[in-house]
Amino acid sequence: MITPNQIPSRPTARIISHSTINESSYIREEGGIVSYILTKNQEKFFLVNSLGIVVKKDKFGSVTNLLLDDGTSTIEVKLFEEKKEISEIKIGEALLIIAKIRQFNQTPYLAPEIVKVISPLWLKVRSKLVKIDEKKAQVKNKKQADEILQNLQDSKYRVLEIETKD
């Protein structure tokens, strides 16, 4: 269990793709104080840095819902405050979102702290960064798999040595 003392006072907003968010496990610790997602690579994300194109916009009272597409998947962004900047966001615009990940009805969504309209060219840069991060994770997993395989092979040879001595 993670305690609030184990979380940095201000977690770093980390780059992550929408598909990774959607495929990850949402974890809410006892008391609901600490929540994060746990990826397949066992990485914890408390705060995310996300880019995407607005493909849908709905307003229900003071709540604005945006559907953001980063090229890997879509994710909903829920804004619970009425602000002029938010009302001016249009479908087709590229956004930079710094947000906490929350869950409603087993579906993750972004609860943003920062929303900024950006140039769509940043999406190309981001897609390359995400691919690099995925490659790094694969290499890390490959190294771990190689270590496990090497340990298994070493133990297999030790067993063979013991059997041949008898």
Image (cartoon, rainbow, N blue to C red):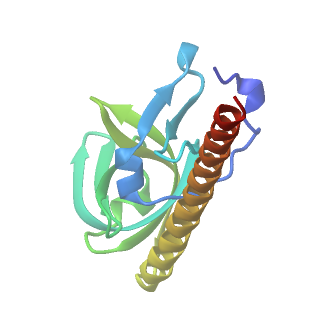
Instruction: In the rendered view, tell whether residue 15 sits above or below residue 107.
Output: below
Residue in the image at 55% along x and 42% along y: 42
| Figure quadrant of residue 123 | bottom left
Residue in the image at 43% along x and 82% along y: 124
Which image quarter is the N terminus in?
A: top right
Left or right for 84, reference 153? left
Percent coordinates x, y for residue 3 in the rendering: 70, 22
Left or right for 4, reference 57? right
| Figure quadrant of residue 43 | top right
Which image quarter is the C terminus in?
A: top right
**Residue closer to the observer: 29 or 82:** 29
Confirm whether residue 70 shows in the render. Answer: yes
**Residue closer to the observer: 149 or 139:** 149
Percent coordinates x, y for residue 6 in the rendering: 75, 30
**Residue closer to the observer: 162 or 131:** 162
**Residue closer to the observer: 55 or 89:** 55
Left or right for 39, reference 82? right
Percent coordinates x, y for residue 140 in the rendering: 61, 58
Residue in the image at 56% along x and 14% along y: 30
Confirm whether residue 78 shows in the render. Answer: no
| Figure quadrant of residue 89 | bottom left
Instruction: In the rendered view, tell whether residue 7 sits above or below residue 97.
Output: above
Task: Spot the residue most to the top.
Answer: 31
